[in-house]
Image: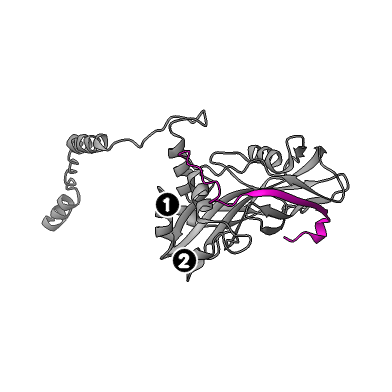
Amino acid sequence: MTTSTRNLQFLYLLPPPLKTPPPPKAPHYALFISSFLLQSMIPPPPCYPPFTSLNSPYRSRRLLSLVTTPISFLVRSNPLGRNRHLSFYPMDNSPLQSPPITFTSPDSLSSFLSPRLRGNSLSTWGRAPGTKTLHNLFLEISQGETSLLVSDQTLIRTVNVASIYIRNSRGLILIESKQLLSDGSIRERSRPLSEKMKPLESIEEAVVRAVREELGESVVVNILEGSSNIRVEERESLSYPGLRAQYVLHTVEAKVVQGLPEEGEFETEEIGEDPVDGTGEEFEGRAVTVKRHYWKWVDERDLRR
């Protein structure tokens, strides 16, 4: 009987009381305040005003940003193909990623180029038929038409070019067969109407200027909608032997409206070459300029791509 009572007492023992959880800790306000103070000490990124005019005082800064900004993708397509297939390819190694180099005079440009060009390439500029002079390159740089850039220890001349494929009523394409230069030499071309683009110039503005300067002020063409493309070509410069060149070609197609003969060969006089640098110094006689253009109509199948 005693054993039985003890068992009953053991079975009806109350469970131990539950432990109360500790109260939540107060937030570390000091940590938040310190983080806020550190962020407030970091200056915000610069914010430049919008560019509403080509004469804006920020024009040079914008031009520099355009030149030095990496080009990640460029459009590659057939500018004459009816069924255009646009594809994209990376340009991670593009020399456009490096800052452009500026020069104060043709002499400073010569001193920079001499140790970087192979052999005596510089001495052939302006002497070999169809080549330009050191003063021509200095003019191109000072006027913003050309940039000299260094990529992987290679010196590259970078040019934005407007390339206009003008068609007549029969579908033939206008080709510049050759040029007469101011030194009397002939430079072979075999390419459509082409013009180096000015800083901040749109493709439409470049087309108007190219037509006026090389074909004549009475010539009118219409740019075909949806025909604008961009592609890149890299090769040795024909105008400056020994200097590598990268051409960013802005191609468009256009149709003749008025002012051009639509058959046979013809020639026009250049009215746009100006041998004056950005400071007003004139290089007449030291820079080779184009005097006359020689044109012909060719079938698309005969065009050298």
Task: Locate the N terminus and report the quarter of the image it occupies.
Answer: bottom left
Q: Amino acid at mark 1?
A: Ile
Q: Which mark is residue 101?
A: 1
Question: In the image shown, does 53 or 87 lie closer to the viewer?
Answer: 53
Mark 1 nearby-residue class (10 Å; few <14, some 14–19, many ≥20): few
Name which residue lies at 57% across and 62% down: 127
Name which residue lies at 19% across and 43% down: 18
Q: Is residue 297 magenta?
A: yes
Q: Amino acid at mark 2?
A: Leu
Q: Position of residue 300 (x, y in %)?
A: 81, 56
Q: Position of residue 51 (x, y in %)?
A: 49, 31
Residues at discs 1 and 2 in contact (Cβ within 8 Å) = no
Disc 2 element: loop
Report the magenta residues as a range. Answer: 279-305
Q: Position of residue 286 (x, y in %)?
A: 53, 51
Q: Is residue 239 shown to the viewer in this render?
A: yes
Disc 1 element: loop
Q: Colour scheme used in the picture?
A: one colour
Q: Which mark is residue 117?
A: 2
Q: Is residue 92 shown to the viewer in this render?
A: no
Cα distance in 3D space between marks 1 and 2: 16 Å
Compared with residue 295, is residue 244 higher up or lower down, i.e. above or below?
Answer: below
Name which residue lies at 29% across and 36% down: 43
User: 169 left or right of 77?
Assistant: right
Q: In the displayed orientation, state which residue is furthest to the bottom.
A: 119
Q: Is residue 93 magenta?
A: no
